[in-house]
Amino acid sequence: MTPQESAYAPLLDEDKITYKDSTYEIVSKVAYLIGVPTRIFQNDYEPPKLEVYEKLERDESARIIRHLCIIRTAIERNFKRINEKMRMEYRTILSLPEYVPPESINQLNADGVKFIKKSSTLLCHHIIEINKEISNRINNCKKLFPLWINWQYIKELFLMPDGLSEDGTKEAADLYYAHFLCYPYQMYINWIPQDVGNILYNDKKFVSKLYQWHNDYFTEYSKVSDAGSYIKGSIYEFISSSEKVVVVVDCENSDPYKLCATLKNLDYQYTQKIASIILFDDVHAASAWRILDSFTQIPVEHMMIERVKQNKSLVDVMLISRTCQEHYKNNVDSFIIVSSDSDYWGLISSLSEARFLVMVERDNCGADLKNALLNAGVFYCYIDDFYSGNSEDIKHSALFMEMYRYIDRAVRLNINDMFDDALRNTRIELSSAEKKQFISQYIKTMQMTIDESGDVVLKFKRT
């Protein structure tokens, strides 16, 4: 690998501090799509991850964009040489494998993409055709990126400004040549080149810079970073040195999505030793707690705590009682408490023979509790620090669950009852065969539309 193919700019020392504990999911996907060479993914010392490459290789939409970008960059890099061969020797880009990778052209042909037109008499015309294909297809890759990232910002990286004109392609080429080493792994993207080190260094740096380029600010850093090795190592050590571990969760004072993210980002080699997760839920807690067991391999026990008085929760009483029972009756020696409530300090201080690890939320845990835990030698960590970019699945499941419940409450429509009512009111008599045909032709083809105010409108399809 040449120095130019590696981190095209020297690794900045501040990157190691500012962007530490980041993830590499987004940069790996961007690197794949813009055509970063496979060997970069295979190198353990480069940011793009091979597992992401292998996953996207199986996605036709991603594969097409990748090879279009590879060919576009290859032409830009070797424009003068290719242009001279075409003009002086009447060669085509198909006969110049030393400049235009034939494997990319072959892959595009296999995927049904043919950008080479007979009318493309000039080399820049090939760039224009590639730009058309990318522009028409890039939205097919939107599904590869999570909802929390601004897709428009990602999309613009692939769209050459004024790229459907000869002048636009020339301006882009001039900018690319002038700042060749500032482009990520020298692959063409649409940006204003800056000497800021490797923009694909990790997700935290890339997303921060991406938003800055659009005069915007990215603040949801838990989406692009994970808890550090010290935090995870302390949790693993706590579990490993325990005989039996149970997680007790105060659902009123914790976040189901953050806890799900925490569990998903801990090594199953250690978490499989956890005997169970006991959820102490209240009617006012988030409904997503009801589906947590679908997103972890650890057995989950769900305890719904009824209220004697509507303004008084009994979750803390039941949690303390059950924890004592687990310790004395079921021989649980270690507990992971998930709650930001200081009420549980009494439990921790009274069960002197038990071991505790506490998971809290940064903004909801007071200084007094943290100081008490620190002075008692009880390790605590923030569930906010764990990578939450992969928690969309539980959020979507929770949303769909609640929307189905809303639909069940709001919509009571039976098409047979509706049709019978219409027949009675119109005093129209139809045979069984006519009824069946009418329902099949007009009612079962009913269409739903949503107006600008969000109201659902049902319409019959009439010929």
Image: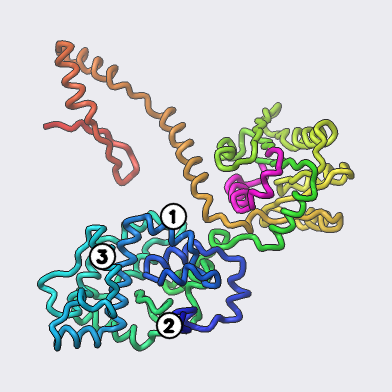
Q: Nearer the viewer, residue 143 or 126?
A: 126
- The first of marks 3 and 1 along the sequence is 3
Expressed as whole percent of the image width and height from the top left, the position of residue 172 reads 29, 81
Q: Residues within 10 Å of mark 3 (few under 14, many from 20)?
A: some
Expressed as whole percent of the image width and height from the top left, the position of residue 415 reads 28, 22
- Left or right relative to 361: residue 223: left
Q: Residue at x 86, y 54 (%)?
A: 376
* Labelled pair 3, 1 in contact (Cβ < 8 Å): no
- Residue picked out by circle 1: 147
* Labelled pair 1, 2 in contact (Cβ < 8 Å): no
- Left or right relative to 120: residue 262: right
- Mark 3 or mark 2: which is in front? 3
- Residue picked out by circle 3: 106
Q: Is residue 207 visible?
A: no
User: Residue 259: within the magenta?
Assistant: yes
- The first of marks 1 and 2 along the sequence is 1
Q: Residue at x 46, y 60 (%)?
A: 52
Q: Residue at x 25, y 68 (%)?
A: 105
- Left or right relative to 161: residue 119: left
**Circle 1: element type:** loop
- Residue picked out by circle 2: 182
Hey, what amino acid is under mark 2? Cys
Distance from the alpha carbon under mark 3 to that under mark 1: 33 Å
- Mark 1 or mark 2: which is in front? 2
**Magenta stretch, residue numbers:** 252-277
**Circle 2: element type:** helix
